[in-house]
Image (cartoon, rainbow, N blue to C red):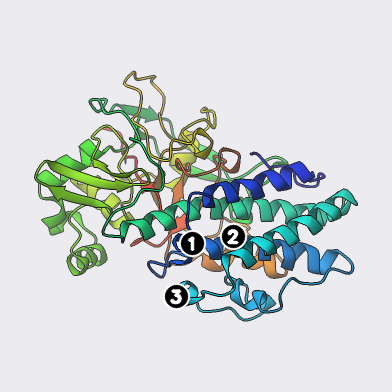
Amino acid sequence: MSVSRPHDTVTIGDYQTVRDETEQLAAPLSPEDQLVQSMVDASPTKWHRAHTTWFFETFVLQPHFRGYREFDPDFGYLYNSYYESVGEQHPRHERGLISRPSLDQIAAYREHVDEVMAIAIDQGLTDIPAVADVVLLGLHHEQQHQELILSDIKHVLSKNPTLPSYRQGEPAPSYPSPRLDWLNIEGGLVEVGHVGSGFRFDNEAPRHRVFLEPFRLADRAVTNGDWLDFMADDGYHEARHWLSEGWALINNQGWEAPLYWDASRSGWQVFTLHGRVRVNPSEPVCHVSYFEADAFARWAGARLPTEGEWEHASNTLSLEGNFANRDVLNPLPVPETSTGLPRQMFGDVWEWTSSSYSPYPGFRTAEGAVGEYNGKFMSNQYVLRGGSFATPAGHIRRTYRNFYPSRARWMFGGLRLASDPR
């Protein structure tokens, strides 16, 4: 589902399609599945369903639809994520302790808000540009949480000793990893950042110029096979590859492989949304932190691309890839045939860049609560680009700036190598 028309009417179909996609993702899960919070970074599925509903109630219906009565006064505290300007929030690390309201009450909450939103849209509320902008933001916000539903429930299920699957079936075929080719990319003064009338988050603008030296970019993402070579060469035990903080982290946490990998007598296995399977060498590696991505790049005699390099290299490519609409729910091996162009830049896995998440020149935080959406997180995080197999296809842009702390690896993060010309 693509929703990308600011200052245009949002239809009931636009709205309901995104809302239905969230329910479809939650449908395979039991009430017990949807309650669990397996770590502080993840949230229960029930919370995601309620929070995305709270967004429309708080930022659209309460301020703009006359006569609206909130569904439950307690929900503003329970399901506010981090918006200080609209009130206090229940502690993030305790979201999994809230057994009540029940799952049935959350379903009723979604139904209530959806019914009123349908009336509001039918009466022309989204003909008002400022309101349409907030509704579009809410829809893209919900699409972000759709991906989080999958990353978070994967972590939940991985903590169960029986390793239950979210989806039955093998995720992808296995065949030899394709050769990695290097592409020479011209540098110069280039423009990056969003341009045009389509939807974008505030952190994607303003468009501005950056100077890039000529560089080389790998034509595919790093694969599990590549990572197995790194591990076989003792990559997790050689301090010279690692940033100091990363070296301390992996030793403190005992990391020996990407998240969800386990060694067995028959070889390495990995827990996926399809259950536990043998590591497929031809798939893009997934669930690695910035520290691991950076260490791998150093081991390979390369580096991570900057986000300016990544965006510039993607300019000639269509926004096509293995996204959530394909319903594969796993990274796919890259086709063996080289095209002379970067492959897999969109979909499969988010790709770490070496760029700190910081404001573009001329960035200004928006007034009001929506100004808290991205700007206040511009500290101690790195940018990822391109989307993953769990990203809704209509949600991605080549200018999209995802961001996570350098230690994070439960999201669907991988990498692509870059280097300076030889």
Pick whichever, 269 or 334, lies toward us.
269
Q: How crowded is mark 3: few (under 14 residues within 10 Å), some or many (20 or more)?
A: some
Residue at mark 2: 49
Q: In this view, does 361 lie to the left or right of 223?
A: right
Q: In which quarter of the image is the C terminus?
A: top left
Which dot, 1 or 2, sits closer to the camera?
1
Examine the rendered structure and indicate whether residue 343 appears above or below residue 351: above
Q: How crowded is mark 1: few (under 14 residues within 10 Å), some or many (20 or more)?
A: many
Q: Which amino acid does label 3 sit on?
A: His
Residue at mark 1: 34
Q: What element carries label 1?
A: helix
Q: How crowded is mark 2: few (under 14 residues within 10 Å), some or many (20 or more)?
A: many
Residue at mark 3: 93
Determine if residue 356 is in view: no
> Rounded to the nearest whole Å, what is the CA distance between mark 1 and mark 2?
10 Å
Kindly identify the residue that appears in the image at 68 percent across and 60 percent down.
110
Q: Farthest residue in the bottom direction?
A: 88
The image shows residue 332 at horizontal and vertical percentages of 37, 33
Q: Which amino acid does label 1 sit on?
A: Gln
Q: In this view, does 10 lie to the left or right of 241?
A: right
Q: Is mark 2 on a helix, strand or loop?
A: helix
Q: Which of marks 1 and 3 is nearer the N terminus?
A: 1
The image shows residue 267 at horizontal and vertical percentages of 13, 42
Q: Which of marks 3 and 2 is nearer the N terminus?
A: 2
Q: Contact, CB < 8 Å: mark 1 with mark 2?
A: yes
Q: What element carries label 3?
A: helix
